[in-house]
Image (cartoon, rainbow, N blue to C red):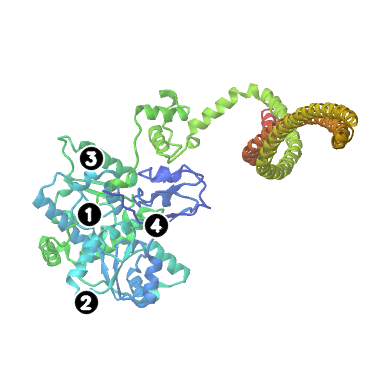
């Protein structure tokens, strides 16, 4: 089963509502009222539409809702329409209700039917149900507020509701069944009841619920004089005493005509403070053997339908309301000749039976208990609510009715369901006042602390304002540092990339240095080899020089011997002379070669020495190149690491900037909060001063 949305029948003017809780006091179901806010609102799905809150509200904050605007609009558009008029019309327009029909006819209503005749048929339906089904009890249902109460709050009573239509719907069904000429007409119910809209929504038998109050306001606003319109009677047979159905006991009076003595088996009850407690008592007795009244003749309104919320007559004395009803009933009783004997009634009953048939007027009811979301707290939950109300024992349960609920438990249930608040409990307010009196001695100390706190807060505000400049400067510095660091990081990345490109050249330089060192060593070795070779040549030259000297000596000896030989030695002398020249030439050449070699050897020695020095320098240079290469490699590695870490630096700076922005935002919030706190403290100081003044 799902929740059923019910049509609102009461509206609230929140500007006029003063939260006085009179409406809760008047409401028979209480929990349709929502007092949790500044204004009292209505949960329409829990509202039974009794209208008692409208009657009790002296501020005109509540008013009825009906279909009058649409009714008049459709009349202006020329839609075909018949009006079904409730018998309470006689108390709203005394002696002019037939003129009222004439006025509606001038607006375009084609025909008029009297609900009183439908009430006569309703009594037959009730009595037939009692005769055939022999129920334990029958709850009369002319009143839709009572029907809604049972449907929403006590569905266990639905089987005991009379399974027949209300007098209004009896009349409507009679029109549809016996007056086919009006089958295409819309039906407007001229009603004293705002809750009838719920009944019409559920049964879908009536097009407009037009309250007599709306019609009277319409007439007064336009200064309509009803007496200037012709009297127009109702179509169909006239009712008899059922024209008094709108008065308390009207059902019983009519039933007595059919079943004399039925009054003794009937319980008659009207008014919200009587009927709803009675129905709740019935619920408690359903599982017992206690005999219940055969018929419950009940109305929501204490003055009956004549004083219903749709009439505007709730504060009119009952005698004034019932006087025109009695007058009309007396006329119709005379019309039907009730003084001429019981046979007249039988004749009238035969007329009624022509318009009553089985099954035509049967009614079933929706179970709307899903609308009732109210949960009643258990003992622990109830105790917790009582604690919030400063109710700690039985002596705190006042049941004072100041909250409107009539009992502390009902108020606690409303609070538990978030339909009210502790501030609306008089005991709670009293408890707070007592607590306030107990802490009065601490007022001066509190005031001193408040003053001290105010001074501290003012100091904090000053510091916070000073901090503002620092935070803004810091934020700008971080932003500038972030930009410069970003430039530096980009430069570092470029340097790292360049260093990586030069690393191979450094390694090549290192290798070339090693190769130069090796070449120099090979050169030195070659020079040393040459030096040794030259030393060998010098030795050879010395030998040649010695040989040349010996040859020269031999040539001299040969020349001497040739001279001794005479002519025979002439040729030999020539040879000896040539040998001597050759030896001298050889000695000369050897001396030249020796000198040249000496120069070469000296040069080689110098070269060897310089090569040694060069080797030492190359070795030192190679070592320095190696050291430089290692330094550059380490530097390049460092650059690479710095380049790799630069992203983290950038991310850290971004994070720092974000945090700086967040600090600035938090600071602004803190500044706002401290300013608000300062204002609150100053206000609290003023309140304390005022309170101190009051107590003094």
Q: Nearer the viewer, mark 1 or mark 2?
A: 2
Q: Is residue 448 left or right of residue 160?
A: right
Secondary structure of the residue carrying numbered label 3 = helix
Q: Nearer the viewer, mark 2 or mark 4?
A: 2
Mark 4 to mark 3: distance in Å? 31 Å
Which one is nearer the viewer's eye here, 574 or 673?
A: 574
Query: Along the polypeptide, which appears first: circle 2 or circle 4?
Result: 2
Residue located 67% across and 34% down the image: 633
Q: Is residue 447 left or right of residue 363?
A: right
Query: Along the polypeptide, which appears first: circle 3 or circle 1?
Result: 1
Mark 3 to mark 1: distance in Å? 20 Å
Q: Tell me which corner region of the image, top left, top right, bottom left or bottom right, holds residue 417.
A: top left
Evaluate if marks 3 and 1 touch, with contact meaning CB atoms under 8 Å apart. no
Evaluate if marks 4 and 3 touch, with contact meaning CB atoms under 8 Å apart. no
Residue 251's tag is: 1
Residue 88 placed where, x, y %? 32, 61
Which quadrant: the C terminus?
top right
């Amino acid at each position: 089963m799902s929740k059923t949305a019910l049509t609102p029948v009461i509206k609230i003017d929140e500007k006029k509502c003063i939260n006085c809780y009179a409406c809760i006091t008047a409401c028979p179901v209480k929990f349709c009222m929502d007092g949790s806010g500044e204004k009292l609102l209505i949960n329409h799905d829990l509202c039974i539409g009794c209208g008692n809150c409208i009657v009790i509200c002296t501020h005109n904050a509540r008013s009825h809702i009906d279909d009058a605007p649409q009714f008049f609009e459709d009349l202006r558009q020329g839609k075909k329409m018949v009006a079904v008029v409730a018998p309470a019309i006689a108390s709203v327009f005394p002696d002019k209700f037939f003129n009222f029909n004439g006025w509606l006819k001038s607006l375009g209503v084609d025909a008029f039917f009297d609900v009183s005749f439908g009430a006569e048929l309703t009594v037959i339906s009730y009595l037939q149900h009692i005769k055939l089904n022999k129920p334990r009890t029958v709850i009369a249902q002319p009143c839709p507020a009572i029907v809604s109460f049972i449907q929403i709050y006590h569905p266990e009573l639905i089987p005991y509701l009379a399974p027949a239509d209300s007098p209004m719907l009896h009349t409507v069904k009679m029109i549809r069944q016996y007056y086919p000429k009006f089958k295409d007409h819309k039906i407007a119910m001229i009603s004293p009841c705002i809750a009838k809209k719920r009944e019409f929504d559920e049964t879908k038998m009536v097009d407009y619920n037009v309250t007599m109050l709306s019609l009277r306001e319409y007439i007064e606003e336009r200064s309509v004089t009803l007496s200037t319109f012709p009297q127009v009677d109702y179509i169909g047979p006239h009712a008899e005493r059922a024209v008094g159905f709108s008065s308390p006991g009207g059902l019983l009076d009519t039933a007595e005509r059919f079943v004399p003595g039925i009054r003794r088996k009937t319980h008659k009850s009207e008014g919200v403070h009587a009927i709803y407690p009675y129905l709740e008592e019935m619920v408690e007795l359903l599982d017992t053997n206690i005999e219940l009244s055969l018929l419950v003749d009940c109305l929501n309104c204490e003055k009956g339908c004549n004083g219903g919320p749709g009439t505007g007559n709730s504060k009119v004395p009952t005698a004034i309301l019932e006087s025109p009803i009695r007058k009309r009933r007396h006329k119709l009783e005379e019309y039907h000749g009730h003084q001429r004997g019981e046979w007249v009634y039988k004749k009238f009953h035969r007329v009624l039976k022509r318009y009553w048939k089985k099954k035509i007027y049967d009614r079933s009811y929706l179970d709307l208990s899903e609308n009732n979301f109210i949960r009643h707290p258990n003992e622990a939950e109830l105790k917790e609510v009582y604690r919030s109300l400063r109710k700690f024992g039985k002596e705190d349960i006042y049941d004072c009715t100041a909250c409107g609920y009539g009992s502390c438990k009902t108020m606690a249930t409303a609070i538990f369901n978030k339909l009210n608040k502790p501030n609306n409990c008089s005991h709670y307010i009293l408890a707070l006042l007592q607590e306030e009196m107990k802490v009065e001695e601490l007022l001066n100390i509190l005031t001193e602390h408040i003053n001290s706190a105010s001074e501290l807060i003012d100091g904090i505000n000053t510091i916070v304002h000073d901090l503002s400049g620092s935070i803004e400067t810091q934020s700008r510095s971080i932003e500038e540092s972030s930009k410069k660091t970003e430039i530096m990081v980009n430069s570092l990345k470029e340097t790292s990339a360049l260093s990586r490109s030069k690393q191979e050249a450094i390694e090549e330089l290192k290798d070339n240095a090693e190769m130069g060192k090796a070449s120099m060593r090979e050169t030195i070795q070659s020079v040393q080899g040459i030096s040794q070779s030259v030393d060998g040549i010098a030795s050879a030259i010395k030998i040649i020089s010695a040989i040349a000297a010996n040859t020269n000596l031999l040539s001299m000896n040969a020349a001497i011997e040739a001279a001794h030989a005479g002519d025979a030695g002439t040729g030999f002398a020539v040879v000896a002379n040539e040998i001597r020249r050759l030896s001298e030439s050889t000695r000369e050449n050897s001396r030249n070669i020796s000198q040249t070699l000496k120069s070469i050897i000296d040069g080689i020695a110098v070269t060897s020495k310089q090569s040694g020095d060069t080797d030492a320098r190359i070795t030192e240079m190679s070592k320095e190149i190696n050291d430089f290469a290692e330094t550059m490699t380490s530097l390049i590695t460092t650059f690479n690491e710095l380049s790799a870490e630069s992203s983290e630096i950038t991310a850290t700076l971004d994070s720092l900037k974000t945090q700086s922005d967040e600090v600035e935002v938090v600071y602004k919030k803190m500044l706002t909060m401290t300013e608000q706190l300062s204002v609150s403290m100053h206000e609290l100081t003023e309140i304390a001063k005022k309170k101190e003044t009051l107590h003094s």
